[in-house]
Image (spheres, coloured by chain):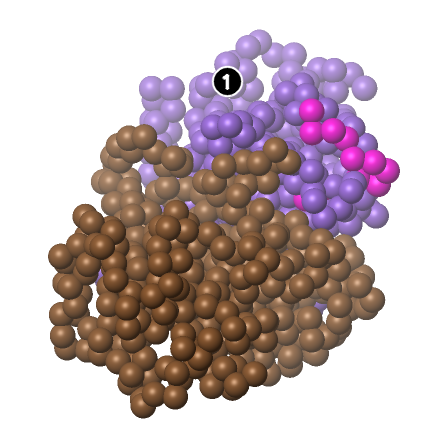
Chain colours: A brown, B purple
Amino acid sequence: MLHNRGMNSEKAKGSRRAAIVGATGAVGQELIKLIEEKPEYSDNLRLFASSKSAGKSIPFRGQEVIVQSLDEADFSGVDLAFFSAGASRSKEFAPIAIKQGAFVVDNSSAFRMNPDVPLIVPEVNGNSLKADGRLAAVPNCSAIILLMAIEPLRKLGRISRLIVSTYQSASGGGAAMMQRLIEETGYYLQGQNHPVPNSKYPPYAFNLFSHNTPIEEDGANEEELKVVQESKKILNDPGLLINVTCVRVPVLRAHTESITVEFTDSRPTIEAIRSSIERFPGVKLVDNRVENEFPTPRLASGQGDVLVGRLREDPSHDKAVCLLASGDQLLKGAALTAVQIADLAMDPALAAI
Amino acid sequence: MLHNRGMNSEKAKGSRRAAIVGATGAVGQELIKLIEEKPEYSDNLRLFASSKSAGKSIPFRGQEVIVQSLDEADFSGVDLAFFSAGASRSKEFAPIAIKQGAFVVDNSSAFRMNPDVPLIVPEVNGNSLKADGRLAAVPNCSAIILLMAIEPLRKLGRISRLIVSTYQSASGGGAAMMQRLIEETGYYLQGQNHPVPNSKYPPYAFNLFSHNTPIEEDGANEEELKVVQESKKILNDPGLLINVTCVRVPVLRAHTESITVEFTDSRPTIEAIRSSIERFPGVKLVDNRVENEFPTPRLASGQGDVLVGRLREDPSHDKAVCLLASGDQLLKGAALTAVQIADLAMDPALAAI
């Protein structure tokens, strides 16, 4: 095991070698920016993408890194391989990266529900990362933001049921969907309807729609199933009741969620919840009733913290509270959590267990 | 009473004289279009607005109608006065219109919670309109769309609790807010941030925010309170439990709502709910799981029906179901409901009671 991970944590600063699979995607781009700022990582960054992006060059610490085709990827010498190129790519290439000695942090859904793979939100279940592992999965972005928002409430009492409606941004559909929202909106403002050939989702300009993933037999869409199943796994609470409705809104890069939390025994005071949020890392209280300042996706964009506010008692249930949360889908919803998981995996304290 | 209402219903076709207060507003414009198409109304339409809009001319059935200042409004000869110029205008001028013989249909919040004033969604509680009344209130737009969506479910069993998150459009804030969303978005696409002096709400381009109404002591905003209080009044069910979170999204003119409905006794089947929706006037089932076609605000825009879909059992509660509803805020949420109330008020059957 030390061969694969522990050795790297003992190296000098700046010696951690990373590879990013899906380097030209929206999450890949954020990963590059985050790694650029972290002195633990060496300048020797390896970037992989589909063959159609191979040959592109991406600036990194003043140099240009050439993107290589994943099909010919060689992970030898890589300590950490961040995968963010979809589930099928992860399924095919993550085992290769592991075999070649890398620790894989996978942003896709490929391994999340595999009972042998830790599914990690560092602030929530970082202790589920095992010293002998070589792979960890980053949860679905909506699940991460939900769990970050409610973790300070979990400190105050057992939660029995969550009722969630999401306001999800285009970034969840990748750089292409962000671009399409921008283009369609531009056309709309010019009085034209953007031609959308073979679209898998409705018009997006000034519109919203039920999340564009297939609907299962019970009527839930795949995104909703992910939130339910992954949340139960991360919290290690298979009996937790979760009702979630996933909706895409015409917002670029941060998800918002309207959350009702039902407690098992009694409702904590709003003051106790505020105080718990203020003490909790990775969340920020934005709850100014006088100025009507609450979490918004534009406020959340570009920052690592999940914003939580609109805290109030649920007038329909004496053990429930309501809140709004906004989190940057590309950062805490994906790239930042991946980098935090990598930090945990490289922590000598973990390797020493 | 007949003097004020009944007589008009006995007149020849085309003799119903309407006045519109707030004629240049977003709802006023829709009222004009609806009345234009209804043969019961005479060509003699009277339009009122603030003094700053007075003198403008608005086309109606091939003629130009000059907008008059409300401050000098004379309602004599008017059968139906539609008020849509804010609560303070309604409070001041609706009594004058009534005194001068008009039946007032008020779109504002001025009289909604007055126990003597019927608050009407025609398909839901049209029978609450009394023959001797001279004033009826149009409910809050979010309440109308909610109640239309759940009325077919109420036919199948008693509802104990509603949990609602809204996705409200700019039109709820009037023509000015719609214009601002368009302008801000245009600036944003050009890489500029629109200067918003003295704004009462956050940036709107590609953003969403908790509804920009003052927050009450219990943490609810005024919009949420309206939905709760008005729904209980309309359904004549003061014990109904309602949890609602009101959020504005960057959509132009239709509201969407994510609704969880908890039944008191048992959950109807999804098939029974579909069938009930299909039988109910004013709602339209949009629930195609295979094609992922569900209600969206752009689909709802411009049509009178409230679209309902995404029907499914709530996996977190054995007596609950979830659904999505979209309705045109300016039509069923305001102008159309007002015109339908006027039709009820003018109905000889009502006058004969």
- Report the residue that reaches farthest toward the right: B265
- Residue B262 is one of the magenta-drawn residues: yes
User: Which quadrant holds the C terminus of chain A?
Assistant: bottom right
Q: Quadrant of residue B147?
A: top right
Q: Chain of mark 1?
A: B
Of residue A246 and residue B247, the one placed in the foreground of this image is A246
Q: Is residue B151 above or below residue A284?
A: above
- Residue A129, percent from left and from top: 54, 72
- Report the residue that reaches farthest toward the top: B12
Of residue A24 and residue B40, the one placed in the foreground of this image is A24
Q: Which residue corresponds to the image point at 16% horizontal and 68% vertical from the top-left?
A: A65
In the structure shown, which secondary structural element does the residue marked by tag 1 occupy?
loop
Query: To which residue does mark 1 refer?
Result: B38
Res B332 seen here: no
Q: How many marks?
A: 1
Q: Which residue corresponds to the image point at 53% horizontal and 43% vertical from the top-left?
A: A222
Question: Is residue A311 found left or right of A123 in the rendered image?
Answer: right
- Residue B267, percent from left and from top: 78, 35
Q: Is residue B53 above or below residue A331?
A: above
- Residue B103, percent from left and from top: 64, 31
- Residue A318 is one of the magenta-drawn residues: no
Of residue B187 and residue A346, the one placed in the foreground of this image is A346
Magenta residues, start to end: B260-271
Q: Which residue corresponds to the image point at 34% horizontal and 22% vertical from the top-left?
A: B63
Question: Is residue B52 found left or right of A193 in the rendered image?
Answer: right
- Report the residue that reaches farthest toward the bottom: A12
The type of residue carrying mark 1 is Lys
- Residue A187, percent from left and from top: 24, 40
Q: Which residue corresponds to the image point at 42% horizontal and 65% vertical from the top-left?
A: A105
